[in-house]
Image: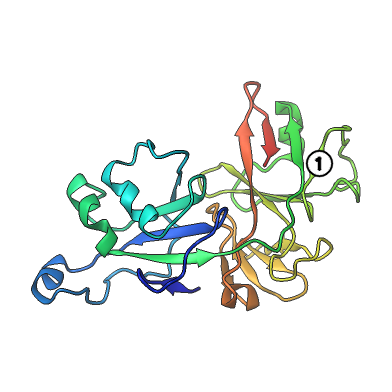
Amino acid sequence: MQVLKIGNGSVPEYGDKIYFRFDRYNLIYFLEHGHLGDPSGNISDISLSATSFILNDVDSQWGSAIQMPMLLGLPLGSEVYLVVASDLGFTNEIANITPFLYKVMYLRDEQIEPSPVYLTFSQAEWMKFGVISIGTNRYFNKSQSLPANFTYKENFATGFGGILLVGGVGGEPYAYDASCPNEGDASVVVSVDRNTFEAVCSKCKSHYEVINGTGVSVSGPASEKHYVLKRYKSIKNADGGYTITN
């Protein structure tokens, strides 16, 4: 995946997913030399501790950390995954100098056409059709009547290439559009490999991380082009079931 540095002229656009990595840089080295040395962390490993923030408006409760995405011209409303990899944590002191320390992974899903998404499950339906444990997965496609024994209501919709539900590491469900963004074809979808728990494209064989909720491409042509699976929302209902929407 591409790692962008500040000042390289690349500006994210609305809806792009930006992955901020706060690495274990040697701050003494920076103070002595005026530039950063090599990070001691693995800058390609962004999936294990990603925390999602949404920039809704200029008054978002980020404190001085709001400077970080805004310096790249990140539009309000874009998704930001901030990964804290410092033993110090994300303190106010560190936040003030974060613009000097971060690197950005710039990922795209623009080949997936915007499409309506809506599924809702009662608790009983979720126990039958949902994903309960890590790596378990289900594919829903209304036009193909999949799964065969699932009853679609008139207002249900399953996105561009169908909905892929995956059980996450912490037990939470993640929902993705099943179409491979590298192909941009609703008929070319990914499925979960039962050994690696990665989603694999049936055509280009690109692999995507799905059990940590990122959808990031980890190998194949999609990784070379910095594609990411389109994410949908999984909302827990009061009755214990779930609603999937965009």
- Whether 60 is drawn above or below 238: the answer is below
Q: Quadrant of residue 191?
A: bottom right
| Total labels drawn | 1
Q: Which residue is mark 1?
A: 157
Between 47 and 29, the one lying in front of the other is 29
**Amino acid bearing label 1:** Ala
x and y, in percent, of residue 41 in the image: 31, 68
Please provide percent x and percent y for residue 166: 65, 50
Q: Which residue is farthest top?
A: 239
Please say if 170 is above or below 46: above
User: Circle 1 — which element?
Assistant: strand
Residue 189 visible at all: yes
Residue drawn at 75 percent across, 37 percent down: 118
Q: Camera-side residue: 56 or 102?
A: 56
Report x, y in % for residue 87.
23, 55
Residue 246 lies in quadrant = top right
Image-based side of 10 in relation to 188, left or right: left
